[in-house]
Amino acid sequence: MMRNSSEYVVVANQASTDIGVKVADALGLEFTSMERRLFADGENYHAFPEDIAGKALIIIASTHTEASHQELMDLIQGGRYFNAASINVVVPYLGYSTMERAKRGSFEIPKGVTRTRQIFRAHPDFVAFVDLHSEAVLHAHGGNISTKHIWTGELVVEHLKQMDLGEFVLVSPDYGFSKQVAKLASLLKCSHTAADKDRYDTDKTIVSQVSSVVEGKTAVICDDMIRTGGSIIQTAERCMDAGASGIAVLATHLVMAGDARQRFLESSISKVIGSDSFPGRVSDDLLEVYSIAPLLAKILKSYLSIK
């Protein structure tokens, strides 16, 4: 059923306000800012500034911090409390997304699944995630939630075509991500390869070698996210050893934890290309940030039949 614009309400958790505004604009809808206050005892006040009963509620919310995850939960359940006609969630960046399984005998909590299950149990009607580390989290519900995994590949391809990278080769930092890199390479009609990487501890890896296919070309190292950047920087070093003429990095989620930015600046990497899925990331002398808002709007427009 087609709805007119007055039947939609677009909100975001506080950290995702910027991308929420962009999504609303791409949908041709007005962005609604939640009323927020912080009480002296640390409790948070949230209020919808208008009646949402009978309206389709659209929530844009990355869950990169504990507070952002909890705020998403509050927004979903607030939508249920005030009788929204439907609750539709887009999570540009899912926190704990690499923790989709527990290692045997470790008794660790696989928070990628358990946190996503919390979202599903709040009973939204539709939840979309962007470039997940693993699709396992999509199945953390009982079959009563409509879910979608949004792949940004075609958007990335268009962005890369507009950049002056010369002749380039796509490089996966390990064989686990090589299928996605091969898919991108087929769209770009360029070569691709994968580095040999071994993990020997949490956040510690060794990259041993990269194919000589990078010789004389710009190596574009691709991954789903950059956290500490350790394995990517090692891959860049191996690419230079193999004769690459330059290094760029491509990743959807620019987490850039700790001293990652400084480490990149001190490396052979000239540019880090990524999206605005992680709150606060904007273009500067190192980062080239493109917006996924038009793609998110396209998905929502199709699913919700927005005019």
Image: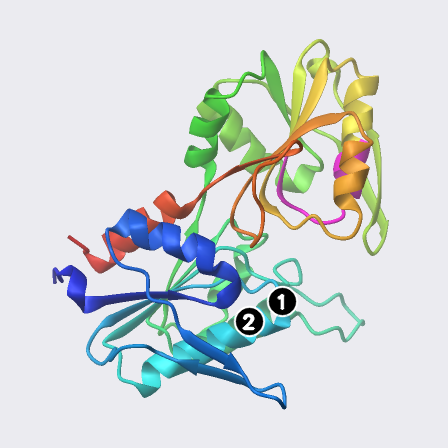
| Residue 233 occupies quadrant | top right
Task: Tell me the CA gap for discs 1 and 2.
Answer: 6 Å
Of 23 and 303, the residue lying toward us: 23
Q: Is residue 142 visible?
A: no
Mark on residue 69? 2
Q: Please state the horizontal and vertical placement of residue 6, each as a whole percent of the image.
A: 16, 65
Q: Residues within 10 Å of mark 1 (few under 14, many from 20)?
A: few
Using residue 142 as the reference point, say whether residue 281 is left or right of it: right
At mark 2, the secondary structure is helix
Of 253 and 191, the residue lying toward us: 253
> For the magenta stretch, what is the residue range?
222-234
Q: Amino acid at mark 2?
A: His
Q: Residues within 10 Å of mark 2 (few under 14, many from 20)?
A: many
Using residue 123 as the reference point, say whether residue 262 is left or right of it: right
Q: Amino acid at mark 1?
A: Thr
The answer to whether residue 41 is above or below residue 158 is below
Mark on residue 65? 1
Q: Please state the horizontal and vertical placement of residue 295, each as a whole percent of the image.
A: 37, 44
Of 9 and 235, the residue lying toward us: 9
Q: Quadrant of the N terminus?
A: bottom left
At mark 1, the secondary structure is loop
Q: Is residue 142 magenta?
A: no
Q: Is residue 258 visible?
A: yes
